[in-house]
Amino acid sequence: MTLAQPSMTTARLLLAPVEARLAQSMLDYQLRNRDHLAPWDPTPAERFFTLSYWVGRCRQRQREWQDGRCAAYVLLRREAPERVIGSLSLSNIQRGVAQSATLGYSIDAGCQGQGLMHEALEAVLDMAFDTLLLHRIQANYQPHNQRSAALLRRLGFVIEGRASRYLFLNGGWRDHILTALVNPRFDPDNLLL
């Protein structure tokens, strides 16, 4: 992509592109939420919890933006912009006839239930549809993750099916509910082939 990855602000949040200067804050977020995120994530190697890993991961995310494959963000409270309280990404960006991406997100255990992720995702979905000109965003969740189910439903995502043993997370194959949101403003004349 030739355009710079945009930062975004919402009523309570700053959404900052993932970059190396945030590596320590991202590591702190992961350490703080290690147990909270474990049921939803792959079982990480110990190096996942090192600063060198997060510096490399941030640089990788920047390259993925430049290559047009991913838009990754961290969530920061406007009054505490040095502390990461969540992350989200539009990954697996496909162009051509698909014009789609996969949405992933996580939030600090202490920030759940405050509407912060909903606020962040509204901004990112607008950017995905209006700036990246995507047609479709997919998001999947484990059937027992009722918070994600409710969040995606409020955002307008529609259940499209169920995938058995879809991802290997937290030491086992996990079923997922498959959902998607289609851009109601998509103009086929803007297809980026």
Image (tube, helix red, strand yellow):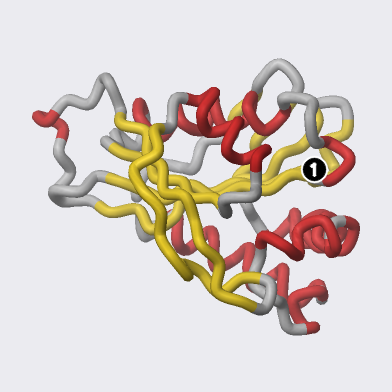
Q: Position of residue 167 (x, y in %)?
A: 51, 69
Q: Secondary structure at mark 1?
A: strand
Whether residue 155 sits left or right of residue 68 in the image: it is right
User: Residue 100 versus residue 58: which sits nearer the camera?
Assistant: 100
**Residue at the farthest left position:** 189
User: Residue 17 versus residue 175: which sits nearer the camera?
Assistant: 175
Quarter assignment of residue 163? bottom left
> Residue at the spot x=68%, y=45% of the render?
74
Residue 158 against residue 163 in the figure, above or below: above
Q: Is the residue marked by circle 1 packed among few (<14), some (14-19), or many (20+) residues within 10 Å?
A: many
Whether residue 142 sits left or right of residue 117 in the image: it is left
- Amino acid at dot 1: Ile
Q: Mark yes or no: residue 104 visible.
A: yes
Residue 32 against residue 53 in the figure, above or below: above
> Residue at the spot x=54%, y=61% of the render?
61
Q: How many numbered marks, from 0 up?
A: 1
> Residue at the spot x=49%, y=56% of the render?
176
Q: Position of residue 117 (x, y in %)?
A: 67, 33
Residue 44 against residue 32 in the figure, above or below: below
Whether residue 67 sits left or right of residue 190 in the image: it is right
> Residue at the spot x=36%, y=48% of the render?
161
Q: Which residue is mark 1?
A: 85
